[in-house]
Image: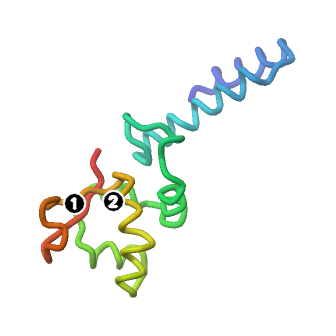
Amino acid sequence: MKVITYYQVIADSTAQTDCAFFIEFMLTVIEETLSESQIITPQATLQDIPQAVLEIMEQYPGLAEFCQHPRSCTELQAFYHLNDREHFRKAVLTPLLDAGWLRRTQPDKPNSPRQKYFREH
């Protein structure tokens, strides 16, 4: 976001006594920022992301970067600081897989002990 552009938008909104243009500008900036941080993919918009995924992302900052490389279930649990494997699967892993946010390295063998999970770019 360019500082000059920001101030130009504020000036235009003030001159028109209408904040809609400024709000639209700020929402666009937020969406671009989220896209750049890889929270959402180019094919998705913020509205397309299930609430469960957004809550997980808020709770565990840095997850997008951590999952850029394939990670085992044990590595993911350690990142989340969760010891109960079943709770981890139900509360974190399954919602991320169902939303397509995480992918399996061996999709045809979901229960493989060598299974790893990653975030597709």
Check the image and tell me how it is coloured: rainbow
Q: Decide if residue 102 is on the left or right side of residue 35.
A: left
Q: State the image coordinates of residue 61 (x, y, percent, origin top left).
A: 48, 62
Callout 1, which amino acid?
Arg
Residue, far right: 17
Q: Residues within 10 Å of mark 2 (few under 14, many from 20)?
A: some
Compared to residue 9, the image places residue 56 above or below, namely: below
Q: Quadrant of residue 119?
A: bottom left
Q: Quarter of the image containing the N terminus?
A: top right
Pick the front one: 97 or 5: 97
Q: Name the residue: 48% across, 37% down.
A: 45
Q: Decide if residue 93 is on the left or right side of residue 35.
A: left
Q: State the image coordinates of residue 95 (x, y, percent, origin top left).
A: 41, 62
Read off the residue under disc 1. 104
Q: Name the residue: 36% across, 57% down.
A: 98
Q: Are marks 1 and 2 in contact (CB under 8 Å)?
A: yes
Compared to residue 38, the image places residue 51 above or below, namely: below
Q: Decide if residue 26 is on the left or right side of residue 54.
A: right
Q: Residues within 10 Å of mark 1 (few under 14, many from 20)?
A: some
Q: State the image coordinates of residue 74 (x, y, percent, origin top left).
A: 27, 79
Which sits earlier in the primary sequence, circle 1 or circle 2? 2
Q: Quarter of the image containing the C terminus?
A: top left
Q: Name the residue: 82% across, 19% down.
A: 18
Q: Quadrant of residue 16?
A: top right
Q: State the image coordinates of residue 116 (x, y, percent, origin top left).
A: 20, 66
Read off the residue under disc 2. 97
Callout 2, which amino acid?
Leu
